Image (cartoon, helix red, strand yellow):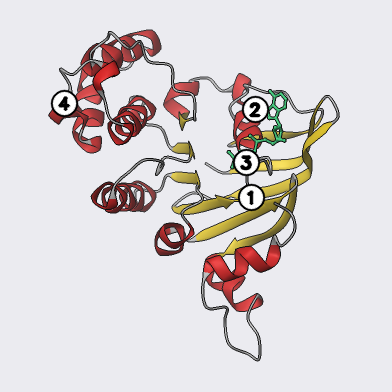
Amino acid sequence: MRIDVDGVSKRFGHVRAVEELSFTVRPGAITGFLGPNGSGKSTTMRIMLGLVSPDTGSATIGGRRYAELDHPTRTVGAVLDTMRAHPAMTCLDHLRLHARLSGHPVRQLDAAAEQTGVATFAARRVRTLSTGMRQRLALATALLGDPGVLVLDEPANGLDPQGLAWLRDLLTRLAAEGRTVLVSSHVLAELEVMADDVVIIAEGRLVTAGPLREVLAAAGEDGAPARSLEQVFLSLTNGAA
Ligand SMILES: Nc1ncnc2c1ncn2[C@@H]1O[C@H](COP(=O)(O)OP(=O)(O)OP(=O)(O)O)[C@@H](O)[C@H]1O
């Protein structure tokens, strides 16, 4: 399923968070979503998930707005920066609760816990988790519905090098299964290794979007591609931070 962001604008008071933003995210690939702090990435992702309504434009998943999806949690899994998990609950109880609320089968819970490594600390209470463990639990929650689309806001946050390698493998596998994977991150070196496509925004507006290789080639000089995604990012978003 494709994600289509079409002419989206959103203001919060006098802050223009997103301005006339349009791009698509294709299935079967990892799309890196980049932009300086405050450039509108989280707002755009929240609009995709129906948590924020745009002033103009629309964000659709497989042609439908989130609120119009027949089975939202079976269609889209999300990791947002603000996962609410009760600190006194164990990871297993947290997953059970979410699975029950959304009507997902128990076998899917087991699969999500295995895939994310949560199975190894399922009996721990949420308040005792490290940042990386919380990220894994958030991902497991997102995967409960076996969704075809994943919208992940900084899932690499707080992961150690092993965690980053694990996340890269997991997302690569999920995309290879034909899922649509949109992932925001400030870890450009990591995104460069795993992303097939990139969408770069600054001050709420699109800077560039397309296959990573083409974006690197277009930003290069004298016929040679740009050296790194970081180089492209810094030159294209210069002064926008
Ligand atoms: N609920 C809100 N009320 C007021 N302003 C908001 C709200 N949500 C976001 N903003 C503002 O909108 C702009 C875009 O914020 P957003 O969180 O979407 O950026 P971001 O690219 O995800 O940033 P970061 O990389 O720092 O997470 C910022 O100026 C932010 O302060």
Q: Secondary structure at mark 3?
A: helix
Depth check: give the residue in front, 106 or 21.
21
- Type of the residue with mark 4: Phe
The Cα–Cα distance between marks 1 and 2, rounded to whole angstroms, is: 27 Å
Label whose residue precedes the other's in the sequence (1 or 2): 1
The percent coordinates of residue 200 (x first, y second) are: 64, 55
- Type of the residue with mark 3: Lys
Q: Which numbered marker is on residue 41? A: 3
- Which one is closest to the eye, mark 3 or mark 2? 3
Q: Which numbered marker is on residue 121? A: 4
Label whose residue precedes the other's in the sequence (3 or 4): 3
The Cα–Cα distance between marks 3 and 4, rounded to whole angstroms, is: 31 Å
- Which one is closest to the eye, mark 4 or mark 1? 1
Is the CB of the residue bearing disc 1 within 8 angstroms of ligand 1? yes
In the picture, residue 191 is in which quadrant?
A: bottom left
Label whose residue precedes the other's in the sequence (3 or 1): 1
Depth check: give the residue in front, 204 or 128.
128
Is the CB of the residue bearing disc 3 within 8 angstroms of ligand 1? yes
- Which one is closest to the eye, mark 1 or mark 2? 1
Q: Secondary structure at mark 4?
A: helix
Q: Secondary structure at mark 1?
A: loop
